[in-house]
Each structure stands twice: as structure tokens, then as C-alpha cells.
Image (cartoon, grey):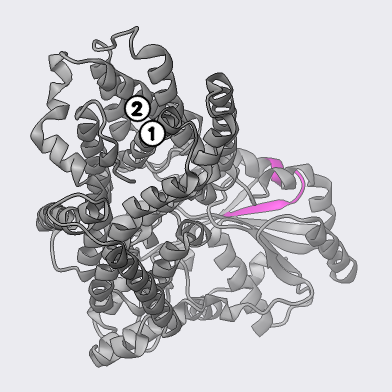
Amino acid sequence: MTDHSTIRPQNHRLQGLRGIAVIAVLIFHLEPNWLPGGFLGVDVFFVLSGFLIGGMLCRSLQDHGRINVLDFYKRRFTRIVPAALVVALLAFPLSYFVLLPSDMRDFSASMVGAVTLTLNKMVANNIGYFSPLAETQPLLHYWSLIVELHFYLLIPWIFSVFKHRTRWLIASLLLLSVVSLLYSNYLSFEDPRNNYYLLPSRAWELLLGVITFILFQTFFKNHFTYSSLGPLFLVIVLGCFLLFNPTVNHPSFISLVPVLSSCFLIVCLMSQTERASMQWLGSPIFVFIGNISFSLYLWHNVLVVILKSSGALDQIYLTLFVALGSVLLAFITWVLVEKPFMGQGMFSLSQMTVSTAYAATLVSCICLGVWGYFSLGFESHWLARQSANVARAYVLSSEASEYESVDHASECSFRENQFTDDLKNRVEACFTKYGKGTLVFGDSHAIGFWRLLNYSASVTPLDSPFVVGISRGGCKPYQERQGCSYQRLIAESEWLRQNFSHLTYVQAGSSLLGSDAEFRVHEKSIAKVLSYLKILNQSVNVSWVGPRIEPNINPRSFIADGCDRKQAVDEDHQNKLIVLNKYLQKAVNDSDVSFVDGRGFDIPQYSSCEFLFWRDENHWSAAGIHYLSEKIDTSRYLR
């Protein structure tokens, strides 16, 4: 998200719209339930950026007859980079004293990613925007800056190619927008992380902003007045802030609603002059927030992550502190960094000062980032500052993250994320050698279940050690995505019949619970799962292992409390999963699919100063798998 105050828009109400967008993002990061679709504020920024950049490039063609690409780059990078690097540098000491070493290591890597313009790809490869891990990264929101910078690298060349051939320019921009939108909709199902973070699937939003400016300037400016429609489009945008939520596939076709509404709203704001119903967007408070919106965007998430990680404030005081602190720091950054680098404000900077400042901040970010990354987030320094029990809890949590230590893959006891021809050939070879085997199938909880069976088989050798896992985190029969193999298994029904005697299906219970405040099971999702398993059951005996009982305890709270303190499990969450298991048992009774109550895989103790049985809120650690292998007769699943 960037500001373009140097462009001097015709209407201060655009600044007010920018202010509304940044407020929406701030509220979402503070508490998503308050404004579930607040993340769409970034999409509004993209449209605004495209609109104003389109104006800048069109004026350059009009005034000079060409695009000075190097000058364009200089102006755009000068607008974004100084403030972004200053905030990153100032966030470093705050993060050093608050974040856990593992989070500090990721933060250090993100500093390097911000400088090298690769941060958005780094986070796309590792975490999702709505993942709990996102709440531990102060610079995660910089991904949108990188997307805009990537866009700025490309857009002047398109204008340079077509110059004054307006219709060809519009046609090319529209074609690129359509291709980007189609690709975005495809990735929203197949690869949501890359879809959310990267330019190819975001370009259409920025391009529509550019197209809006060209159409407005060329065809609409002097012919129509849209004053009566402005409030309607604003209501639609605000309604999307309320109605969208992280479960919506976004960006995708449905994202056209807030994006196109933003385009039309901008046209309305630029067209009308006397319409009283929209004058409030140009009021001093909204213009002020719009003016500092770039620095406000930079600072707010840093404060949200730091203060939430410290655990020092409850929600009310956290909200007040973040809101007031972000505005104050944003104003200071706007006055002391943004305006001077743009050649505005109370004092100016010489070219030598600018160059020195650039070099110093770039080198500092890279050096600190590399140092923090290779020192494992200054782990030794952090441990030295902690009590013995907190340090021990951290060691246990770190060891718990090495959950793959229980994997003892062998020739015919192995797991893959998805169905492949290589897996198919390997299974057929194992059938020839051992006879029919067992297949474990599902999401990340199925991965843990395969580890349990595989580890048990390695401890107590079986006559037929043939246990195959095909499982991937987030894969559900009713949410087919890239890398999920549900339809492939249906197509391979004869292959299943020939090579396996039993299939065990496992998935997390949370996705089978409704998202409403009032507890309910998600009957439609359950029906879809059961319908799918009935089809598989025609080829192989199917068992559905019900949702395991989860402690729902964040390992970070375990570390903060120290390993000697008894952790209170989330009883409300446990009770919901118990009810869910009972519901599933009843639903499955009317079919040939067998059901195993997930309560049988309960671990009554969360941890001790000797073992930690969970690596996060709901996945077993290696110690947890060791415990269950001694408690449960797993041979019944290996038949």
C-alpha cells in the first residue's frame, strides 16, 4: 500500500478513501472478528495506486511525449523504500526483546526479503496470510509493497510501447487484466498462498485502476456526472469489508465486487463537485489519515505483532495503544522521512544525504537480517535472559517441532503428499511382495496418524509392513485444491481394490464445526465427506477415524508460562469435539463405513518438563506419537 500525495489528485476525497482503507486493514489485524473483510483495504489501495500511477504516466506522455522509465523508477522507489526501511530497522530492537528466537529468525529473513524484493515469495512459500503464524511476523504486511514495486517495474514499459495509441493501450491493459483475473481465480482453488501474495494474480486489481484513470480522463471526465452513485458504491465497498472473511477464495472472480466498486467509486469522487453526501470524505480528519496512510500501514502491524507477542495488554488497551501509537509514529515518519525524501516538508535533503541514507539503511537491514537468521534469531542471547523453566519450555517446544524424527520410511512403508504415477508403481511392487496393504488418507491429521502407524510398525514388526500415506494439510473432500488427490483416488477404484485391504480416513475436526458464535456441527461438510467415503468403500474397506481431542494450547503460551506450570486445556473446544465425534458416529452408523471415535487418541497430559506431546495446538509431537504407540493397539488399523 503506498501513498501518492505528490500526484495532487483533483479531489481530497481520494485521500479520505485511502484513510478508510487503512483503517479497515488496521481493524482486521487488531481483531478479525470486528471486520472480517478488512483485509480488502489492501485491494482498495491497489486500485487507488493503479489509478494514480495511470495518471502519472499519462501526464508524462502528455507533457514530454515519452516515458522516462529511470525517472519513474526513482520517484516510485523514493516514495516507498525510505519509510519502509526505516520502520523495518526500528522494528528490529522491538522484535529482539519480544519475539521468540524462531520468530526472530523469520523476522530477520523478512528484512532481507524486503530489501531484495522477495519477501512476498518467502511468505507465500511458508505461511498463509490468515495463518496463526502470520501473527508473529511484524513485516508480513510488506508483501503488498513488494507487489506494487514489482508492478512499477513493468507498467512504464507498457505505456512506452503504445505511447499515444490510447485504444491499443486500453486493449492491452484489458487483456492483461483478464489473463491475470483468470489466473487468480484458478490459483484461488489450486494454490491460495501464491495467489494471495504474488503479482501475477494481483496485477488485474492494479491494472483496473490504471484503466479507470485512462477511461475517466479520455471519455468520462467532461461528459457525465456520477454524484448520485457515489454513496451506493461506497456502501458496496464497506459491505464487502463486513461480508467477506478469510474463508472466501480471494482474490478470485468474487473479488470483482469490491474491486470494480472501488473503481466506480473513484470515478464518482473525481467527477462530483457539490454532492454533499460525499463531502465528509474530504474532511480534515480523513484527509489527514489519508496523508499519513502509508506510514500508518507500515507501523500498525509492527505494533500489533509486538504487543500481542508480549501479552502485556488486554484487547481494549491493545486497541487503544495500537491506534494511538500507530497514528503518532506514522505522523512522525511522514514528517521526518516521507516528506523530506519527496523534497517536501520543513527541510530538504541533498543528493549526497539521500544516497548515504539509502546505502546505510540497505546495508543495515541486510547485515542485521543475515546476523539474526544465522544466529537462529539470537537464540543464545534469548535463552540467557530467561528463567530455567522458560528456557526448558523453549527447548521442549523446539524439539517438538522436529516431529519428522519418528518417520522411518522403508520400501513399503512411506507417505506422499499426493497421488503420483511413481507412488502407484511403488504400491504395485509392494503388493507383489507383501500382499494387500493399508492406506491412510486425509489432511495434516492423517499425516500424524500415518506417523503413528508407521512408528508402531517399526517398533513391532508386522508380517505385512505395508502402510502407505497419501495426505496433505488442508485437503478435504469438499475443498479440492492443488496437490489433493481425492478425485484421483475415485478414478483409481480398481487399483485400490487390487492393492489395499483397508483405507483409514482422518481429518481435523475444526473444519467440521460451524464458524458461528453458537456451536453447531457443519452438517453439509460431514455429508460430503461421508458420501465420498461411501464411494471408496465400494472398492476397499473404509474406516473414518473421528477428530482427535485437542488441547488447543498455543506453544508460545506454554513457553511464556514455563514448563513447570500446568497448562489448562481448552475445555470448550474439547467438549465440541466430543459432541462432534458422537454426531459422526450416529451419521456413519447408517452406512457400511466403519467409525472410530477420536477420543481414543486422547493424551490426558499436555506436557511436563520432560516431554511436550504436541507441536502446536492440534498436531502430535514425536513424544506424543511415542506415548500413543504404547497406549493404543494399532494393529487393528494394519490389516
**Along the viewing direction, whichever of 399 and 384 lies nearer the viewer:** 384
**Along the viewing direction, whichever of 520 and 124 lies nearer the viewer:** 124
Kindly identify which numbered label has been placed on residue 71: none
What residue type is disc 2 on? Ser
Determine the secondary structure under disc 2.
helix
Q: Position of residue 453 (x, y in %)?
A: 63, 71
**For residue 633, above or below residue 511:** below
Q: Is residue 605 visible?
A: no
**For residue 538, above or below residue 97:** above
**For residue 591, above or below residue 541:** above
Q: CA distance from mark 2 to mark 1?
A: 7 Å
- Please state if 527 lies on the left or on the right of 501 as rendered: left
Residue shown at the point (70%, 60%) measured from the top left: 439
**Along the viewing direction, whichever of 226 and 239 lies nearer the viewer:** 226
Residue marked by disc 1 = 47
- The image quadrant where one finds the C terminus is bottom right
What residue type is disc 1 on? Val
Q: Position of residue 147 (x, y in %)?
A: 45, 49
Q: Which residues are magenta?
A: 535-544
**Along the viewing direction, whichever of 563 and 159 lies nearer the viewer:** 159
Pointer 2 or 1: first along the chain: 1
Q: Quadrant of residue 452?
A: bottom right
Residue shown at the point (38%, 74%) measured from the top left: 363
Q: Is residue 598 visible?
A: yes
Determine the secondary structure under disc 1.
helix
Q: Position of residue 233 (x, y in %)?
A: 30, 20
Alpha-carbon neighbours of circle 1 within 10 Å: few (<14), some, or many (≥20)?
Answer: many
**For residue 166, above or below residue 139:** above
Kindly identify which numbered label has been placed on residue 262: 2
Label 2–label 1 contact, CB within 8 A: yes
Residue shown at the point (38%, 13%) measured from the top left: 220
Q: Residue furthest top?
A: 223
